[in-house]
């Protein structure tokens, strides 16, 4: 089957040809005909399967065949995404696939000023891709309404639940019009997700593709047992020994991600972090640099990295093992995309061994256990000091106050120095600088030696 067999409108086929897409992926083959008939759909599929095009193409087809004015302060199609990065990525896909159609696409998410979004939505938009929180903010401010939505998509439903979006989703469900087409996607379908799906869908067609283990089969998976405190040293060796094009390094916590970045920077290795404490600007910059290959290492927490589609990730490194096996599958799914081979390396501390067992049970794959490298203890001893925390928006108020005070003192000192520099030498009564000798001849506790002075 080819795209041309699906009956999609000509401008869409032209856009697909421009992207060199010829064959629809399995989820596209199953979903597109159903959606073109206007039916509801419940899809079990994870990112990397081509699900974005599976819902974008038939929707674009609907708009191409049914042109209509956009509702004021409203939209014709609403796509909900759990993360800002995924929302931006989905919006870009709509723009790409719809480039020969005259349709407006807007993306709205938190962490950036709302006023620009209010202006962009005021005249109405064809397709809005949104995260739930900011969407409700806009609705509460009466800047936007979803009452005219013809097509509604809930993407990555399981992650929405993980992120605690259940109440926003229930509110959104009540604000949508009764008569609409619904699409619901989730990588997994446990009971609570099924009941959430029930609140949105009417008599859906169910499609399911690529059981999660198939991604795992193309990934060379290995694990090394190592003390938590010595993981940084192991990471440095792995990065040195492996032939890495692009690596995603996962940590469990936001601080953990920052610590890894500082440790790498201490050794002169550039890496960026993305997690919930970073500003939207920082997250976008980091992801863009990683995508464009300007930085080879991206350190991320699960929440920030889910759904992100970056091609050419050769390695996924689990600096910490996730305590939910499905999360492991999502992580390693970042590599081995589009038929490529990938490597996943996991660092397992003693208290993480039960998590490893659970992962092996879920994926039915036994990880190769790699011993610690030969030069490991030496690497632990010689591990460079981590770089100092970066000054930036994530500083605490106390850190900020210390920085401001430090700057004030420094500037005062500079003013004094500048003044003295203009006086003839020796007239200001300034003492020559002292240097404390900490080692070598004559050094003893408390010894102070004036340097430059005649002996
Ligand atoms: P997704 O699962 O939607 O994140 O898509 C994964 C990747 O596959 C994206 O980079 C898409 O651009 C790409 N893709 C989607 N459909 C096709 C297709 N039919 N042929 C080739 N690549 C595709």
Image (spheres, helix red, strand yellow):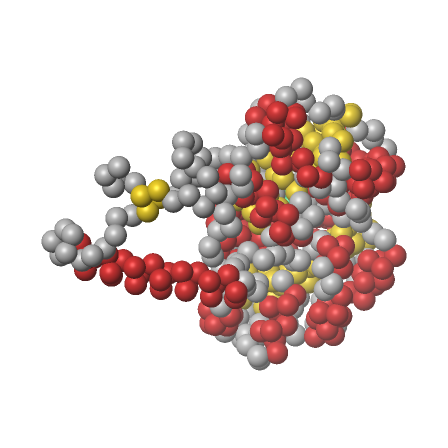
Number of labels in the image equals: 0
The answer to whether residue 271 is left or right of residue 149 is left
The answer to whether residue 365 is left or right of residue 375 is right
The answer to whether residue 294 is left or right of residue 60 is left
Q: Give coordinates of residue 187: x percent, y percent.
A: 76, 48
Q: Give coordinates of residue 447: x percent, y percent.
A: 42, 43
| Residue farthest to the left, as pictured | 424
Please state which of residues 412 and 52 is positioned toward the viewer in this rendering: 412
- The quadrant where residue 316 appears: top right
Quadrant occupied by the N terminus: top right
Q: Give coordinates of residue 418: x percent, y percent.
A: 20, 57
In the displayed structure, 153 sits above or below 272; it is below
Quadrant occupied by the C terminus: top left
The answer to whether residue 214 is left or right of residue 410 is right
In the displayed structure, 268 sits above or below 51; it is above
- The quadrant where residue 213 appears: top right
Q: Is residue 335 visible?
A: no
| Residue at 40 percent of width and 31 percent of height | 441
| Residue farthest to the top, as pictured | 374
Q: Give coordinates of residue 292: x percent, y percent.
A: 48, 39
| Residue at 51 percent of width and 70 percent of height | 114
In the displayed structure, 151 sits above or below 371; it is below
| Residue farthest to the front, as pictured | 455
Q: Is residue 241 visible?
A: yes
| Residue at 67 percent of width and 29 percent of height | 343
- The quadrant where residue 329 appears: top right
């Amino acid at each position: 089957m080819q795209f041309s067999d699906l009956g999609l409108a000509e401008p869409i086929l032209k856009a697909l040809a421009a992207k060199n897409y010829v064959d629809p992926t399995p989820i596209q083959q199953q979903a597109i005909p159903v959606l073109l008939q206007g039916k509801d759909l419940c899809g079990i599929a994870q990112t990397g399967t081509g699900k974005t095009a599976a819902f974008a193409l038939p929707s674009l087809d609907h708009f191409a065949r049914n042109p209509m004015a956009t509702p004021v302060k409203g939209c014709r199609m609403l796509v909900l995404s759990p993360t800002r990065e995924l929302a931006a990525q989905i919006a870009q896909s709509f723009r790409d696939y719809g480039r020969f159609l005259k349709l407006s696409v807007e993306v709205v998410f938190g962490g950036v000023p709302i006023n620009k979004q209010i202006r962009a939505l005021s005249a109405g938009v064809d397709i809005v891709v949104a995260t739930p929180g900011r969407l409700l903010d806009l609705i509460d401010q009466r800047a936007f309404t979803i009452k005219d939505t013809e097509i509604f998509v809930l993407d990555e439903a399981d992650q929405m639940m993980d992120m605690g979006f259940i109440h926003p989703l229930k509110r959104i469900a009540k604000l949508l019009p009764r008569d609409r087409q619904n699409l619901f996607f989730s990588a997994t379908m446990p009971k609570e997700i099924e009941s959430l799906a029930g609140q949105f869908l009417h008599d859906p067609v169910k499609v399911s593709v690529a059981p999660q283990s198939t991604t795992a089969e193309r990934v060379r998976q290995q694990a090394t047992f190592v003390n938590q405190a010595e993981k940084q040293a192991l990471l440095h060796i792995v990065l040195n020994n492996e032939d890495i094009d692009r690596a995603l390094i996962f940590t469990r916590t936001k601080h953990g991600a920052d610590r890894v970045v500082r440790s790498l920077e201490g050794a002169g290795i550039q890496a960026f972090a993305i997690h919930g404490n970073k500003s939207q600007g920082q997250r976008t910059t980091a992801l863009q640099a990683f995508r464009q290959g300007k930085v080879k290492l991206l350190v991320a927490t699960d929440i920030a990295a889910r759904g992100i589609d970056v091609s050419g990730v050769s390695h996924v490194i689990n600096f910490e093992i996730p305590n939910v096996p499905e999360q492991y599958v999502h992580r390693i799914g970042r590599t081995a995309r589009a038929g490529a081979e990938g490597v996943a390396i996991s660092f397992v501390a003693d208290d993480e061994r039960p998590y490893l067992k659970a992962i092996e049970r879920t994926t039915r794959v036994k990880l190769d256990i790699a011993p610690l490298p030969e030069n490991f203890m030496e690497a632990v001893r010689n591990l460079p000091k981590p770089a100092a925390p970066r000054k930036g928006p994530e500083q605490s108020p106390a850190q900020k106050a210390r920085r401001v005070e430090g700057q004030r003192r420094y500037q005062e000192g500079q003013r004094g120095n500048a003044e003295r520099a203009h006086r003839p030498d020796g007239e200001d009564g300034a003492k020559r600088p002292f240097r404390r000798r900490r080692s070598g001849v004559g050094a003893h506790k408390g010894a102070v030696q004036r340097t430059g002075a005649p002996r």
